[in-house]
Amino acid sequence: DAFCNFCFRTKNPHPDFDESIVVKKIKFQNKGLFICINCHFDFLDKADGNEDILNKLIAEKYNFINLLKKSNIF
């Protein structure tokens, strides 16, 4: 039942593995969100180890996804 709130993956993208993805639960805006290991490391790379930048990247992407959902685009 693993699910990433940022890329919406549910299955491991590697063709040799037929199992769910690895996710980490994070707290954001008083919500429990799940982030897959791929998205997590993408955010970490972009933030270059800076926690404030990491949190801003997560907030921007999450808010953008919500905006697209409300506009029925996504």
Image (tube, helix red, strand yellow):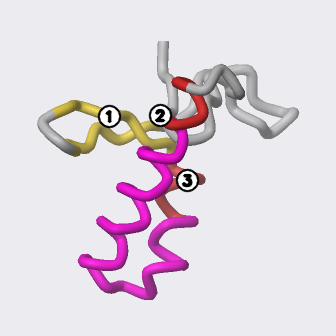
| Amino acid marked by disc 2 | Asn
| Amino acid marked by disc 3 | Cys
19 is higher (above) or lower (below) than 60:
above
Residue 13: % across, % down: 77, 37
Residue that badge 2 annotates: 66
| Contact? badges 3 and 1 (CB < 8 Å) | no
Compute the Cα span from label 3 to label 2.
Answer: 17 Å
Q: What is the magenta segment's predominant secondary structure?
A: helix
Residue 44: % across, % down: 45, 72
| Mark 2 crowdedness (10 Å alpha carbons): few <14, some 14-19, many ≥20 | few
Q: Residue at x 60, y 26 (%)?
A: 71
- Which residue is most to the right? 15
Residue 33 got which mark?
1
Nearer the observer: mark 2 or 1; the answer is 2
Compute the Cα span from label 2 to label 1.
Answer: 13 Å
On the rendered image, what quadrant is the C terminus found in? Answer: top right
| Contact? badges 3 and 2 (CB < 8 Å) | no
Residue 5: % across, % down: 48, 33
Residue that badge 3 annotates: 39
